[in-house]
Amino acid sequence: MRVRRWIGTALACFLLLLNVNLVAGAQSPSSSGDVVLRVGVVSDLITANPFAVSAGSDWTVATTEYDMMLKFSNQDLSPVPSLATGCTHTTDYMTWTCTLRKGLKWSDGVPLTSADVAFSYRFIIDHKIPQYRSYFVSNPVFETPNATTLIWKADAPTFALNMPPWAYIVPEHIWSKYNGADLKTIKAVPNVPTVASGPFVLTSWKRGQGWTMTRNPNFWGTPPIVDRIEYSLYTNQESMVQALKNGEIDIADGLTPGLFKSVSASPNVTGQQVVSDWWLNLAFNFGGQGPNADPLPALHDLVVRKAIEMAINKQAIVDKVYQGTAQPGDTIIRQASTYWHLDIPASQEIPYAPAGAIKLLTDAGYVDTNGDGIREDPKTGQELRLRIPASQDTTGAVDSGQLIAGFLKVIGIAVDLQPVTDAKMNDFWAAGNFDAYIWYWSGDPDPNYQLFVFTSAQCGAWEDGCWKDPKFDALYQAQSTTMGRAARLKIVQQAQLEAYNQIPSVVLAYPSWLEAYRNDQFTGWTPAPGAKGYLLPTYNYDTLLSIHPVVGASGSSSPSLPPAAWIVLVIVVAIALAGVLRRRRTADDEA
Amino acid sequence: MERHGYLLRKIAHAFATLLFVLTFNFFLFRVLPGDPVGILARSERLTPTDIAALRAQYGLDQPLPRQYVIYLENTATGKFGESLRSGAQVSTLIGSRVWPTVLLVGLGTIASTIVGVMVGIRGAWTRGSLYDRTTLYGAMVFYAMPEGWLGMLLLILFAGTLHWFPAGGYASADTVGFDRILDVANHLFLPCLTLALGYVGSYSIVMRSSLLEVMNEDFVHTARAKGVSDRDVRRHHAVPNAILPTATLIFLSFGFVIGGAIVIETVFSWPGIGLLTYDAIRQLDYPVIQAVFLLSSGTVILANLFTDVIYGYLDPRVRAS
């Protein structure tokens, strides 16, 4: 009897499992009739607080939820209307008047007025919110003569509104209670559920699992067709790719080059290689950060830096490290800033020419005097051996470092590559106890911030290795006080050329962000910037307003064991249990 | 008196170990290179002044002994503080991860215990048979196989190729109620199977070898000579005496339930304690790392204490020594 009970229990468990798989597999998450976009991501949402955003998914969520006063265009990230229909300026560029749309509302139904805009900007300035404060130079004050007018007055000419300021407009009735709080307190505000003005708001969030954004009924623009966006976190790229192939998700965000190539070749999947908005950087150290800064003196010699640049095969880095999903690097303004990025003319490019690099070094007196294969500095007698930390947390940095070590060995320069975490990279950066490092830089669509970090004044702060170039500093100043966009562009290009020729760092590559989506589920994506832009919200949320299901799309569903396989399994288990039962009866009989 | 003395000694040892872990946890992670606030410099555009201000606000500018005292006070009062990275309460973060981990590792351990012990017993009892050889080699293969690799194989086969199970995660976003339970079970199957297969190997090998030793003992031969049936010899004489090493292994395994299974959780995107620990270490999130390690260490210490006590009562020779 006891044996029969056990077998009965086992069968019940098995049937329950059968039920689990069949039911779970059969249910369609879209069965409610809602249009649901399912997104797979590899970067978890760390905060829903717009004043604490840090990692990729934080920015995605904030950009989807919140509006800026002016937003980035889909074509070239130039300023276009958002909450404001436009801004005008006085001839001296010291006063800007912006007109907001009428009838704006927050997601909770409270009216959104110019007072909210003024509050948001004031909050950033007063609390020194690090992510946004650089847009508010020249001591601006804000006036709100009526609900739809914001007047921005600065004590010097400013083009801040033409950048435009990447600062989210938050509701004063929610955030005013944190006025006067310290940054730690502000960063700790959970901000869920969120009150915002964008097309979707965050409605549920399970750390480590994913989050859901639901359509905002009070959104001021064209209502999106999608009712809900469900983000699922994958801690393993392979599983995210399998989920995309399975149809569990509609789009996968942030793929590795190897998986991107393979999944893009799958049926019903289209890959999107996004124009790069960051660059891999071999930065030289010139010293001056503090008492522990001890870089190789020879790096002050442009000949040595130029020889290193000439010895590095950037195309090999693109091909081997990024498997073709990158572009060789040239200037310190990334490619995504399409209007500002300078594509160095071929006639002015520093070529990949190891033989030329060897000649440069030899002619300058850097020769191998002791026959160990490493050249020595004629002034100090020190061998040209570079300590190069490389960030393990930056895609491709360590692999590129290994290639670079090989490239530089050819010209008689030794490399001690040190793969370290970003935490340790930060220590190197602050102390200056390295000769060069491999890390990354990104930036804004506007070039001001990226140029700023290379100025002499940033030694010990933002500057990689305390490069000091008066000409570059002057160009930075000139562009920051030039109001006309076209005139400013010329100066920005000169600044890029100066950095390119003086080589404070070698811009190794512009790696692409990689996305892939099911072309049998959704269509109508609006990439930004340009046709090779991001499909998911990064610079604006327009793509969410334009996407719609493909006619005849089946909708995503959870995978399940096919009924035939279950039947076979049931038969196998039944036979096995019958065998056990028979043996036990035999044993009982023998006893 | 002897029993109480044994118990008290074991409890005292466990308490001393916990105190050591408490101190070790604090200093170990501060040896890691890097500054937990400075690490955000690029992503949040913090200047050196911002970093100094935030360090002061988080109390990281205090001398280490002072930070240690604050840490002890907070731990004693059950306050684990806030995550340096997200600002969320550490207890909330851990609370949201404990259940998935217990579900995965707990179920995997229970399933593998039952199967592993049964396979080991039958293998030893039919030593040299086809069944024994097959299960022994199978157990050794699963025992030696890296669980991440095994998980990846199962993932590619059952999720990517056959589309029988989800490729990862804990549950679909919009399921509620009973549907959610079914959905979680569907997501749980592959990671649980991966974990169980690895454990089954070790349990069955230990059980088999332990039983083989006992089978040659005099009391087993005596039982057989007295005409006790084969089944009763196995059930009432051999297995109870052979179960001790396996029981130790099983109880210790339950100690690691809270610690999570980092590799399996990573492969299957399972939102457990293991992943939380990994992320916290990478981001130098001291409050989270300290709390997680204290919790996992405490569980292991408790499991050890439980094993010691049970072992002492199961085998009086241990207690006496």
Image (cartoon, grey):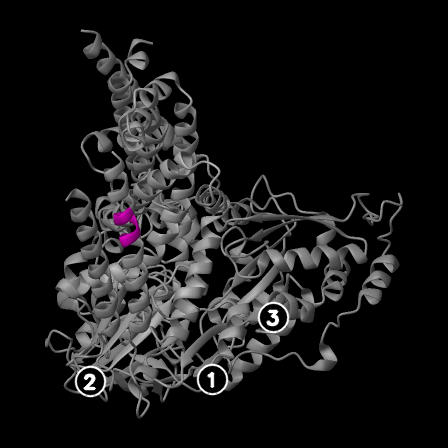
Q: Quadrant of the N terminus of chain B?
A: top left
> Amino acid type of disc 2?
Trp
Would you name the residue on which mark 2 appears? Answer: A220
Of mark 3 and mark 1, the one earlier in the sequence is 3
Can residue A140 be seen in this snapshot? no
Residue at 84% of width from left, 61% of height from top? A358
Chain under disc 1: A
Asked whether residue A579 is drawn in magenta, I would say: yes
Q: Position of residue A288 (x, y in %)?
A: 60, 47
Chain under disc 3: A
- Left or right? Give the position of A377 relative to B114: right
Distance in Å between CA atoms under marks 3 and 1? 40 Å
Of mark 3 and mark 2, the one earlier in the sequence is 2
Please state which of residues A492 and B274 is positioned toward the viewer in this rendering.
Answer: B274
Q: Secondary structure at mark 3?
A: loop
Would you name the residue on which mark 3 appears? Answer: A323
Residue at 28% of width from left, 33% of height from top? B299
Residue at 87% of width from left, 57% of height from top? A362
Would you name the residue on which mark 1 appears? Answer: A484
Q: What secondary structure prevails in the magenta region?
A: helix
Asked whether residue A186 is drawn in magenta, I would say: no
Please state which of residues A125 and A435 is positioned toward the viewer in this rendering.
Answer: A435
User: In front: mark 3 or mark 1?
Assistant: 3
The quadrant where residue A116 appears: bottom left
> Amino acid type of disc 3?
Gln
Determine contact: label 3, label 1, CB under 8 Å: no
The range drawn in magenta is A577-582
Q: Please, is residue A283 above or below residue A97 in the view?
A: above
Chain under disc 2: A
Q: Please, is residue B6 above or below residue A28 in the view?
A: above
